[in-house]
Image (cartoon, grey):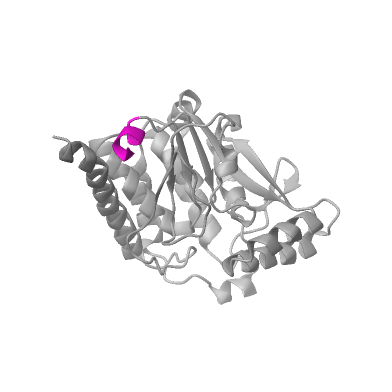
Amino acid sequence: MLIEMMEDIIYLVLQGGGIRCAWQAGFVAALEGERPIRPHAISAVSASSAVACAIVCRRLEFAVNCFRAAIDGNKKNIYLSRVLKGERAFPHAEIYRKVLLQVFDKAALQELYAGPDIQVLVTRPSTKLPRYPSLVIGLTLCACKAFRTRRRCDRFETQFGFSREFIPVKECATPAELADLILASSCTPPVTPWYSLHGRPVLDGGLCESVPLSGLPRKQGNTLVLLTSKSTTISRSPGIVYAEPSEDLRIASWDYTDARKIDYLYALGKKDGSTFLKNADMPRTSSG
C-alpha cells in the first residue's frame, strides 16, 4: 500500500525545526534520485518553508551548501561584545537572510510562481495585547508545547488571542519579500528581531502548529509528512505517510556554530530517504 501511495502523493507537509530541517532536505534529495514526488501543495513552517521553496526550485543541495558555507566561519551563537557597540548579539538573522537571498533569486521566484502552492505558517499575536507581553506569552506557549500539554496550550492560545495565518509564497513579489516571509515564520526573539509582516507583528508559526497539516487544501489526498523529531506526538490519520529521522536529533534548532552538523543532518536524511524507498518497494518485491 505504501508504494501505491508514494506514486500518488499530492500533498507535502514539513515540520519546523531550525537547522534540523536539513534532514528533510536530504530525505527529499534521496527521493529525487529514485522516485521524485511532485506535490500539488506544500504546507511548511519556520525553516522548513525554506526547504519547501528549495524543493520546488530544484535547489536543495545548493541551499544546503550555501547555508553550510555561511555558518562555517561563525564561532558563537551569541556575541555579547556587540551589545556595547549597539549591534545585535545574535548573528542568526543576518546569516539566515543572507543565505535566503543567495539561494532564492529572481529566477527562483519565477520557478516558485510556476510550481505548486506553498503555504507558510506564521503566528499572529493578539492586537489587544501590548508587544512585549505578547512575546512573553508566545514563549510560554512554546514551553507548554515542549512539555506536550496540548489541550492546555489550545486554551491558552484562545484566551490570549493568538492565531495562525497561512501566507502563500506566490504572494511574494521579490526575493526580499520571500526572505521576509520565511524569517517571519521563524521569528523567535531574542535570537531574531521581532518582525512585522504586512504591518502586523508575527512570531514563529510553530507556536501554533509545529506540523502544519491545517495548511493543506480541504480536499483530501495522499500526504507525505516529514518530521524533524523522532517519535513526535501527533494524531495519525489514514492517507497520510509519516517519515522521521532514524536517530534522535539532539541538535539545537538555532545552533549556527558547527557546519559539520549540517553535513550530518543532510547525510542522515539521504540515508533515511533511501531506506524509506526500500521499504516502500518491499510489497512490490514480495509479490514478484
Instruction: Give percent across and percent down for residue 71.
Output: 40, 60
At 64% from the left and 47% from the top, the residue drawn is 122
* Residue furthest right in the image: 128
Residue most extreme to the left: 288
Left or right: where does residue 223 sit relative to residue 205?
Answer: left
Instruction: Give the camera-side residue of 212 and 179.
Output: 212
Q: Position of residue 193 (x, y in %)?
A: 64, 58
Q: Is residue 104 visible?
A: no
**Residue 242 shown in magenta:** no
- Which residue is situated farthest in the front direction here? 287
Quarter of the image that includes the C terminus? top left
Q: Is residue 180 visible?
A: yes
Segment tinted magenta in the rendering: 1-7
Classify the position of the N terminus by image quarter.
Answer: top left
- Residue found 50% across the figure and 26% down from its top: 113
The vertical placement of 24 against 117, above or below, is: below
Residue 256 placement (x, y as % from top left): 44, 64
- Up-down: is 233 above or below 1? below
Q: Is residue 22 above or below residue 1?
A: below
| Front-lying residue, 209 or 281 | 281
* Image label count: 0
The overriding secondary structure of the stretch rendered in magenta is helix
Q: Position of residue 175 (x, y in %)?
A: 53, 36
Instruction: Indicate the quadrant where residue 56 lies.
Output: top left
